[in-house]
Image: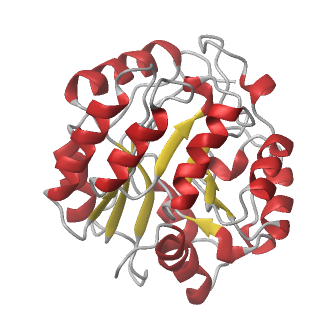
Amino acid sequence: MLKPHLPSLDDLEGHTIPAGFPRVIDAHVHVFPDGMFKAVRRWFDENAWHIRYQLSTSRVFDFLLSHGVGRIIALQYAHAPGIAGKLNAYMAEKCRQYPDRVTGLATVFPGEENGGRILQEAFDAGLGGLKLHAHVQCFDINADDTEHIFEVCQSNNKPVVVHFGKEPKSPVYRCDPYTICSADKLARVLANFPKLALCVPHLGFSETREYKALIEKYDNLWLDTTMVLTDYFHIHERIDLKEYRLDRIMYGSDFPNIPYAWDRELKWLRDSPLDDDELDLILNQNAIEFFRLDV
């Protein structure tokens, strides 16, 4: 569970991606308009940790690209109904400033009026998929209105990134993630939408075993590594990616909303027993397939 004032680490950061790495696609980067970014930072200061990198959207992109990241997948989420359209327009405008370097995902608030139309307009504007966050948006993933959103994504051949692991939980969320999130509930979506590509971040923390089993069963499920390879959170068993289906694992950083060096997870991967081909899958090829990138 998230607790206020978790530590901010003063670990050293590198000037570029580790030597010898293939092209790195960061599949989990957060951006918001300035006002929302400030609100996000206040929330983290009060309820979790102090965010180390307090940057605007353009500076987020410039930082990662100048440090050797080859491509960025930019994520956002609407925390309330009525704001998704403006957020999507903002994302599309920012991505146009970084052609072929940044792919932005749309947002929609499940259950809001005209959600399908909002999402279709975002896809028509060039956004490359959908980001949902169950902890913040507090939706039923098996409800009719959520399934309608998935239908729009599937018909447009657009992937969905949905934070659906039960952790990190916080008592200040409007809902209990342990009630609304579970691998079993996501399995129903995977079965009902076999052509819809879905990614669950953080390896499904804290149901990592359950999600590890799901990627073995469903070809339309991916996981990303965000924050769980950094030895920051207490995890009962150290993650051994060698035991995973590696063609379904993507690297993600959670930049800039992190309490440690931007490349902490990349260094973990560098020091892991993964060989060059396996690293290329996680750092590059899997994201190309999932997000259908033209590279």
Q: Is residue 219 above or below residue 119?
A: below
Residue 286 as seen in the image, left or right of residue 187: left
Q: At x 49% / y 64%, what residue is drawn?
A: 267
x, y percent for residue 109: 49, 29
Location of the C terminus by quadrant is bottom left
Q: Is residue 2 visible?
A: yes
Q: Which residue of the protein is positioned furthest toward the left in this rendering? A: 97
**What colour scheme has been applied to the protein in the rendered image?**
secondary structure
| Res 182 quadrant in image | top right
Q: At x 61% / y 12%, what residue is drawn?
A: 174
Q: At x 34% / y 60%, what residue is drawn?
A: 72
Q: Is residue 227 visible?
A: no
Q: Is residue 130 above or below residue 99?
A: above
Q: Is residue 229 above or below residue 194?
A: above
Q: In the rendered picture of this protein, how many numbered marks are placed on residues?
A: 0
Q: Nearer the viewer, residue 62 or 102?
A: 102
Residue 80 as seen in the image, left or right of residue 217: left
x, y percent for residue 201: 60, 49
Residue 56 as seen in the image, left or right of residue 32: left
Q: At x 81% / y 71%, what residue is drawn?
A: 243
x, y percent for residue 53: 30, 38
Location of the N terminus by quadrant is top right
x, y percent for residue 172: 59, 11
Q: Is residue 135 above or below residue 190?
A: above
| Res 177 quadrant in image | top right
